[in-house]
Image (cartoon, rainbow, N blue to C red):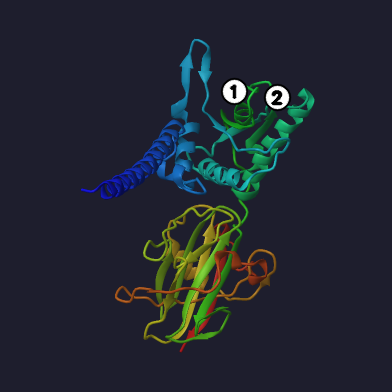
Amino acid sequence: MSKKKLMNFRRTIHRVRGKGIHILTKAAIVFILSITVLTAATIFNIPWHTACAKDGVNINRLSEQYKSALSLKTISRSLEGVTVPSLVMNLDFPVNSSSLTPRAIKYLDALGLALQDETLRTYIYRVDGHTCSLGSTEYNYNLSFQRAQAVVDYLVQNFYLPRDRFIIKGCGESKPVANNATEEGRKKNRRVVIINTLQDFQETGKPERPKVKVCAKYVRSGEEKELTQGETLNSKDTYCVEFSPQTAAHIYLYQISGGKKDLLFPNEKYSKNENPVIPGRIYRVPDFGRGFYLNHQKGEEQLVLIAQKEELKDPMDFCQKAAALGTTNLKKGLSRSMQSIREALEETVPPAPLKMAGKPDDLQENSYNALNGIFNEEEAFIWKLSFQHQ
């Protein structure tokens, strides 16, 4: 081999070796990051896929963890006395602020669901607010009280949790759990602690009726429109129902056609979501990107949505009673009634995949009415919409 060819060969080997080292370096970085995430998930008792998620919160699983932390099984006894169940929540409060961030709200949604559970609902809870050491003692005391107040306000406004079930306490900077000399330590000290006092709470009065925004939509010739009362759809149209609960509730969506009642929600064939639903979220049935279409049976179709605080023992019977009621007596303010929409789906006719125009954020306040005063039994919210299948 000539000297020139030998030099070229050595350069080639060097380039290949360099690329190989570069690839191995990237692989090593990815491996280290994966181990770090898994370790963090283990330390903080968070499922690894939740730790990896962009929004980072699996509400249903987190709710189960919160229920466990606040349950009686965590009571411990020692020479120093009884340690009551408690839950530390680092809600990432901004400095000098009691504002709840979107991420904090997701954690509070999980807490609200946990406190509504029948195993926890009979107790009184103390909510302690804490701060870091920045600022005066008096200022930090007031700020810590405001943080605890913000948590209670959110829980009361969005869940069936009476205000007198909570005791609010500001602790200021008096009980740090980390070193206030570092920002990382100060961030840990800006927290709220939920404590099960083990005192019995007696619930009085009837709960308010759930509030739900509801909207029906259909797609014709590629254009998505709002489906209104008495409108006519044909076999080429596809449609869906969107709803956004304003308070935590159990929701049941039925379609009635020719006396036959089909459960559309909760139903894993059409939606991955289940009860109880989370306040503030937008749900779509069927799931986003899909649509219902009509079968060969023509005539009047009706959709009935029922929302109640507690799980219904016989939602089918409730639906039958609700469907027999009229569609008058509309009231502004809760959620506009547009009344019924029919999925007319059979086991052999699955929903067709469909790209719907619009996004979840398109659900606007002016897209709703409320059907009110038609059915007061069991404190339920009822929405109905009828249309013609041609």
Horizontally, residue 2 falls left or right of residue 367, namely: left
- Give coordinates of residue 338: x percent, y percent: 59, 75
* Residue at mark 1: 178
Horizontally, residue 90 falls left or right of residue 13, namely: right
Residue furthest top in the image: 79
Residue 133, label in figure: 2
Near-viewer residue (254 or 130): 130
Near-viewer residue (47 or 238): 47
Near-viewer residue (376 or 117): 117
Q: Evaluate if marks 1 and 2 touch, with contact meaning CB atoms under 8 Å apart.
A: no
Counting every numbered tag in the picture gives 2
What secondary structure is marked by label 1?
loop
Near-viewer residue (138 or 270): 138
- Give coordinates of residue 129: x percent, y percent: 66, 31
Alpha-carbon span between mark 1 and mark 2: 11 Å
Residue 24, label in figure: none
Q: Amino acid at mark 1?
A: Ala
